[in-house]
Image (tube, rainbow, N blue to C red):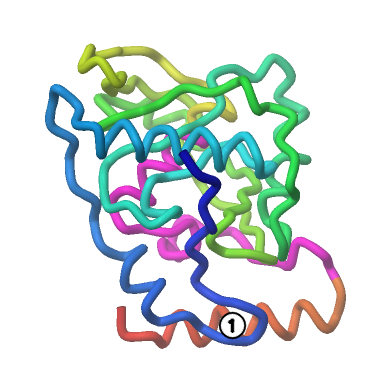
Amino acid sequence: MAIKNIVKIWDDEKILKENINFLKTKTKPVTFPASDYIKNIVQDLIDTYQKITCAGIAANQIGYDYQIFIGMKTLKDESESEEVEKMEASKTPILKNPYANNFEIYINPRIDSFDKKSIKIDEEGCLSVPGLMVERDRYDKIKVRYYNIDGNVIKTKLTGFLSKLFQHELDHLNGNLMIDDLSAIEKLYPAEPTEKNAKLYGELFSKYQKFDK
């Protein structure tokens, strides 16, 4: 239906309070059969995903408060993930997605179980947190379930990058961002490492932490 703008928590040197409040609000579950409105959301997610370099987009990142996200379905080479994360963290969206036709729609997603011993520290970028990257903990092995647009439940196991992606997008739908859980974060740093950017994103992160969410 349309390519949507990404809802961001900051723009240049400004904290965007209204956007933060929206992204910090837990999204609503989808009921089936899916309405035309829900189908339009799904199409907007597809259109936006296919235009912007990213691994996934949650519905609230394009302005909809429903439990839906689009994400890569497969990744044959895990080494590609580092470049994807860096492009996703870019200050301005890169208007080309090499994974445009590699996607799955996840509706009402949830994690059924996880391997407690599989915690792994890895890089993450986020379209809603432009310019900043983190290294943080995620479970490397999880069992999940979600629904497709026809209302059929799908249960599967995810590992590696796809496990991290699922957890990242599920956090979005629950009103959490990758920079919220300080206990899971190893470090934060600018996607483009310069002294100016280190100062800028250090200040923005500090303002975000002090914001009354």
Residue 71's spot in the image, x, y percent? Answer: 51, 31
Is residue 110 among the parts visible in the rendering? Answer: no
Which of the two residues, 209 or 114, is positioned nearer the viewer here? Answer: 209
Residue 105's spot in the image, x, y percent? Answer: 41, 26
Which of the two residues, 20 or 198, is positioned nearer the viewer here? Answer: 20
User: Looking at the image, which residue is at 61% across and 49% down?
Assistant: 124
Q: Based on the picture, tell me whether residue 97 belongs to the magenta stretch.
A: no
Badge 1 marks a residue whose secondary structure is helix
Q: Is residue 177 above or below residue 85?
A: below
Which of the two residues, 98 or 115, is positioned nearer the viewer here? Answer: 98
Using residue 54 as the reference point, say whether residue 158 is left or right of it.
left
Locate the C terminus and report the quarter of the image it occupies.
bottom left
Q: Based on the picture, tell me whether residue 173 belongs to the magenta stretch.
A: yes
Q: Quadrant of residue 169?
A: top left
The residue pinned by badge 1 equals 204
Q: Which residues are magenta?
A: 164-193
Which of the two residues, 8 or 180, is positioned nearer the viewer here? Answer: 8
